[in-house]
Image (cartoon, coloured by chain):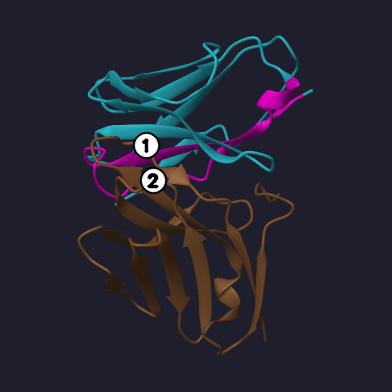
Chain colours: A cyan, B brown
Amino acid sequence: KAGVTQTPRYLIKTRGQQVTLSCSPISGHRSVSWYQQTPGQGLQFLFEYFSETQRNKGNFPGRFSGRQFSNSRSEMNVSTLELGDSALYLCASSLDGTDTQYFGPGTRLTVL
Amino acid sequence: GESVGLHLPTLSVQEGDNSIINCAYSNSASDYFIWYKQESGKGPQFIIDIRSNMDKRQGQRVTVLLNKTVKHLSLQIAATQPGDSAVYFCAERNTGFQKLVFGTGTRLLVSP
């Protein structure tokens, strides 16, 4: 069974732009969670989607948003990028959110 | 490139030694704990998990111990190998919430 895939793997943007990241969960997994990883803050939870609905949200500004499609694929969007948004964005999938989460390789976003 | 903290606690061991990585968790209501391994440039990889109704669980070469009294979790790796070199994260989850709260991580360096 294929693992979690994320695209693109690397992105370079400038301040003020917006970006969309994509995540395809493991087949059969309906829960997708997003995390931001930075050297200073570590791994922080962004939000979790299940059956196209956001179930949980972390403490991030409204510039960070996401959605999930009927095939469980998920996207996250960051608008009006700031330098501090430079990070590794990780997506994790699980069957229903209460079990083991499996991570993708991440998307490395650099904001210049 | 590496995406984890620059000032992580580091455990240096010789190949063949047993390694013990410790983690203090914060929420006494957490009922699920998980260890991940993250190699440079990759997403976190699931190692082993444990629920709060257990105090020990064993996998292949790894053992997780949970002490709820002092809110402490440890990961023991037997016969450590150079391929075990990575950053190890513990994470906790509260009942009913799907998000994982991650520790800061420990870097394990294994010398041949």
Q: What percent of the width, then of the height, locates residue B30? A: 32, 47
In this orientation, which residue lies closer to the viewer: A74 or B60?
A: B60
Write the residue at 49% across / 52% down: B44
Mark 2 or mark 1: name the one nearer the start of the chain.
Answer: 2
Q: Where B26 sits versus A81, above or below?
A: below
Q: Amino acid at mark 1?
A: Lys
Q: Amino acid at mark 2?
A: Asn
Q: Where A60 sits versus A63, above or below?
A: below
Is B33 on the left or on the right of A98, as rendered? right
Judge whether residue A100 is colored magenta.
yes
Write the residue at 39% across / 80% down: B61
Q: Which residues, given as a range, are shown in magenta?
A: A83-111
Element type at marker 2? loop
Is B55 on the left or on the right of B35, as rendered? left
Chain under disc 1: B
Chain under disc 2: B
Judge whether residue A32 is colored magenta.
no
Residue to which mark 2 is pinned:
B27
Location of the C terminus of chain A by quadrant is: top right
Q: What is the quadrant of residue B27 in the picture?
A: top left
Residue to which mark 1 is pinned:
B99
